[in-house]
Amino acid sequence: MSSSTAITNIATLVTNDPSLGDDSPLGLIQDAAVVIEGDRVTWTGESSKAPATDNRVDAGGRAVLPGFVDSHSHLLFAGDRTAEFNARMSGRPYSAGGIRTTVAATRAASDDDLERNLVRHLAEALRQGTTTFETKSGYGLTVEDEARALRIAAAHTDEVTYLGAHIVPPDLADDPAAYVALVTGEMLDACAPYARWIDVFCEKGAFDGDQARAVLTAGKARGLTPRVHANQLSYGPGVQLAVELDAASADHCTHLTDADVDALAHSRTVATLLPGAEFSTRAEWPDARRLLDAGVTVALSTDCNPGSSYTSSVPFCVALAVRDMGMTPDEAVWSATAGGAAALRRDDIGRLRPGARADLVVLDAPSHVHLAYRPGVPLVTQVWRGGRREF
Ligand code: NIG
Ligand code: FE
């Protein structure tokens, strides 16, 4: 039998299970403890009632919350796009075409370079409290380059997404239909064994609604579940398509009609908001308030990529969502934990309740609200993943 550990003297515990706490969506418990056995949580409640355990760790009156679930990132890339960012901050608009710069650098990189870059960003994310992450291909855009990106990703996470349909690569710019045929044919065959999800960038300058539907239905037929880059730079068919195909998530959701919001509200497709992208492209913010008021499930993620959102920090995204997208601190923290889990259709993460994976973050603050109240401050002081203390 594995030994048991109690983390005690927690000022505020976020369980994300209303039945365990104060009936709010965050299921808050004050003066709390969490008991871990093996890789699971076995008990949560008031510290004074904690059962006897083999080990005890005193949280010192700090806050504990589930590890962040970053359900949207693009970490299989090489190079950076500092010059493009600089140009944008001098007034140049963002466009999907910048992806080509990263495609060239990624194709030129060795497997080792790609993996080293991935591992470096994962370490950075863990330091900021991310215990589960999804990541995508999309900067290779040949059969070999997409498959190797996914093979490398699959060695580090179960949440791997095939994004062969990121843009039409320059070499096939004159024949998008041929590229869609490749993405839904030979490339899909090579990539499906490494992936759980299939994604498409449904946007002007990338793939239109019909092309996106072809990509996602081919992926579904191969057992992959859709998620969609939808309505990021302009209004379009992405969100409706995501709902129609029962995608796990429609990501970005920056330009939404009332019909888009309504479709999301009547579906099980999560709206994943990625404020790092609006920050780094000086674009208008997605309206989280409108989505939440309509009853849509909202996730918050980093979209970490070298072009539109080069941040691995979920706490930064929480602060932006509270300041600029109409979310309360409670809502933003829920979306970055339980919301991310919903976007990955997982119920073993994003909550601290008996049976859940023991993935948790200790903040050097008395409550989770400090994530937004103290933006930019490195509050994550301890991370446990699968019952193991990482630091
Ligand atoms: O999610 N929108 C499409 N893909 C990325 C951007 C990729 C890039 O600019 O390199 C995104 O923002
Ligand atoms: Fe993205």
Image (cartoon, helix red, strand yellow):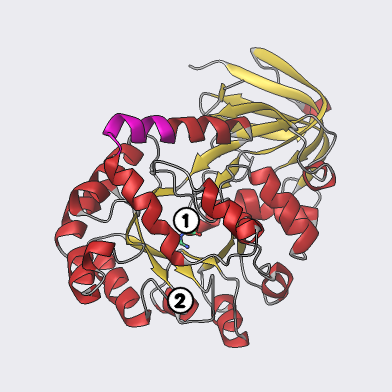
Is the residue indicated by label 2 positioned so its CB lies within 8 Å of ligand 1?
A: no
Viewer-side residue, 268 vs 287: 287
Q: Is residue 13 magenta?
A: no
* Residue situated furthest bottom in the rendering: 259
Whether residue 344 is situated above or below residue 157 in the rendered picture? below
Give the residue displayed 35% in from the left and 55% down from the top: 138
Viewer-side residue, 27 vs 77: 77
Q: Position of residue 177 (x, y in %)?
A: 21, 76
Quarter of the image that includes the C terminus: top right
Q: Is residue 151 left or right of residue 122?
A: left
Q: Which residues are magenta?
A: 109-118
Give the residue displayed 77% in from the left and 62% down from the top: 324
Element under disc 2: helix
Q: Residues within 10 Å of mark 2 (few under 14, many from 20)?
A: many
Give the residue displayed 49% in from the left and 43% down from the top: 133
Q: CA distance from mark 2 to mark 1?
A: 20 Å
Can see residue 18?
A: no
The numbered disc on residue 67 is none
Q: Position of residue 201 (x, y in %)?
A: 41, 67
Q: Amino acid at mark 2?
A: Gly
| Residue identified by numbered label 1 | 345
Q: Residues within 10 Å of mark 1 (few under 14, many from 20)?
A: some
Q: Position of residue 181 (x, y in %)?
A: 18, 70
Q: Amino acid at mark 1?
A: Arg
| Residue identified by numbered label 2 | 238
Q: Is residue 185 left or right of residue 258?
A: left
